[in-house]
Amino acid sequence: MKDIDDSKMPLLDHLVELRNRLLWCVAALAISFGVCFYFAQPIYGWLVQPLKNVGQDKLIYTDIFEAFFVQVKVGLFAALMLSFPVFATQIWRFVAPGLYRNEKKAFLPFLLMTPVLFALGASMAYFGAMPVALRFLLGFEGTVGGVTQEALPGVGNYLSFATTFIFGFGVAFQLPVLLMLLERAGIVTRDQLKAGRRYAIVGAFAVAAVLTPPDVVSQLLLAVPLCLLYELALVAIWFTQRRREMTEGGAASEEPETA
């Protein structure tokens, strides 16, 4: 049995194949957007629950078109999440014919881990980080110099806050997959990752500063899990290395001895 499809495909056929995959992605996104836009208000209602749970029960909008565009953004954001499996499947079906069997076996688990880790990151943002950040940020309400200071978040402002948290945490939780792929490709080694731990911590805080609102609490809520995920990736790489060594050792012991 052939380990790879050695048939040759002209460049034009590759471009046609790529176009077809992109069309599937666009169609999936368009259908998902139609469905999600129809349910945009319930989805936004789910997004505002952390705000409601900390005692804020009012959202405002000052631009006449703001509420409508918020529903469009909610529909698009939800459609991207909903259609991601289609994107991943089309990418895999485009790339897989050019991979060896062992490369497919090595790459496929990482592809399957991506949505799981994204969901874990998004769940941590929604159920953990957002409530803590909102309590901190809304804690500045009160009287300042005899003047009442009251939080009146706008619908667009809160949507940006929520999607930044959810998307930022979801993307950041892909760190173990990225590091394991780099190690698997031979770009970095576990020893190099261990030696660069201090730089990774600095990088985690830099990423948190970019992906979260500009307050210390929000940045800590992302930077600390990133540091823990870095350590988790080191442990996972150690296990995969041991497994590869055992597999290679078993294959070598089964080879017949030559006279």
Image (cartoon, rainbow, N blue to C red):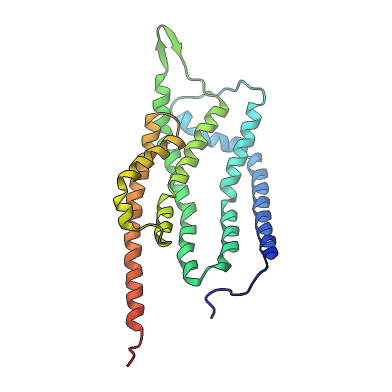
User: At 65% from the left edge and 44% from the top edge, which residue is drawn?
Assistant: 33
> Which quadrant holds residue 34?
top right
Image quadrant assignment for residue 123: top left
Residue 38 vs residue 149, the one in the foreground: 149
Q: Extreme bottom residue here? A: 259
Q: Position of residue 156 (x, y in %)?
A: 57, 29
* 92 left or right of 252 in image: right
Question: Residue at the location (39% across, 22% down)?
Answer: 139
Query: Is residue 73 shown above or below 31?
Result: above
For the C terminus, the image quarter is bottom left
Q: Nearer the viewer, residue 235 or 115?
A: 235
Question: What is the residue that sits farthest to the top in this orientation?
Answer: 146
Compared with residue 92, is residue 49 higher up or lower down, i.e. above or below?
above
Q: Residue at x 55, y 24 (%)?
A: 154
Vertical placement of residue 146 versus 234, above or below: above
Q: How many marks?
A: 0
Query: Residue at 47% of width from left, 45% of height from top?
Result: 170
**Which of 175/135 is in front?**
175
Residue 239 lies, in percent from the top left, at 32, 62
The image position of residue 94, as x and y in percent, is: 60, 62
- Above or below, 243 against 79 in this view is below
Q: Position of residue 230 (x, y in %)?
A: 35, 49
State the residue in front, 140 or 21.
21
Does residue 237 appear to the left or right of 165 in the view shown? left
